[in-house]
Amino acid sequence: MPNIKSSKKAVKVIAKKTDAAHEYKARVKNSIKKCEKAIAAKDIESAQNIIKDVQKNIDKAASKGLIKKNTANRQKARLNKKIKDMK
């Protein structure tokens, strides 16, 4: 446990940022899972609607530095390919 006032504040700030990061990552993972379920159920319309939210969440996470840009692009490309193959 830190003794210096600035170190105590730094611990609080880091905890807050970590919580926010976990929230964004969870949002991305959950939206991807939701899209995968729609694809597995062969529901084209809902998959196309969900993919928009997925892309938005992935782009936000990438812009905040939570996931790398190439990873974000790869995830989006794979989901889009699965939806195109459904047609």
Image (spheres, helix red, strand yellow):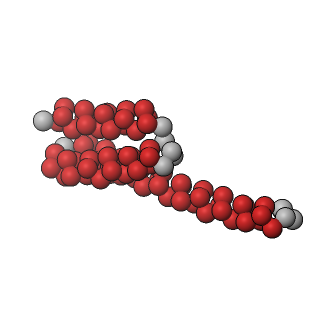
Residue 15 or 26: which is nearer the viewer?
Answer: 15
Query: Can residue 72 be spotted in the picture?
Result: yes
**Foreground residue among 81 and 8:** 8
Question: Which residue corresponds to the image point at 69% horizontal and 65% vertical from the top-left?
Answer: 12
Give me the residue at 19% from left, 32% from top.
85
- Residue 72 lies left or right of residue 9; in this view the side is left
Q: Residue at x 32, y 46 (%)?
A: 55
Q: Quadrant of residue 17?
A: bottom right
Asked if residue 16 lies left or right of residue 54, the reply is right
Q: Among all residues in the image, which is located at the extreme front?
A: 6
Q: Depth check: 37 or 25 in front?
A: 25
Determine whether 78 is above or below 56 in the image. Answer: above
Q: Is residue 11 above or below residue 60?
A: below
Please state, as top left, top right, bottom left or bottom right, where the C terminus lies in the image: top left
Across and down, in percent, residue 5 comes to: 81, 67
Q: Position of residue 20 (x, y in %)?
A: 53, 59
| Image location (x, y in percent) of residue 43 | 18, 47
* Horizontal arrangement in the rendering, residue 82 relative to residue 19 (left or right): left
- What residue appears at the point 47 percent right and 55 percent down from the top-left corner? 24
Dividing the image into 4 quarters, which one contains the N terminus?
bottom right
Q: Examine the image and state in which quarter residue 78 appears.
A: top left
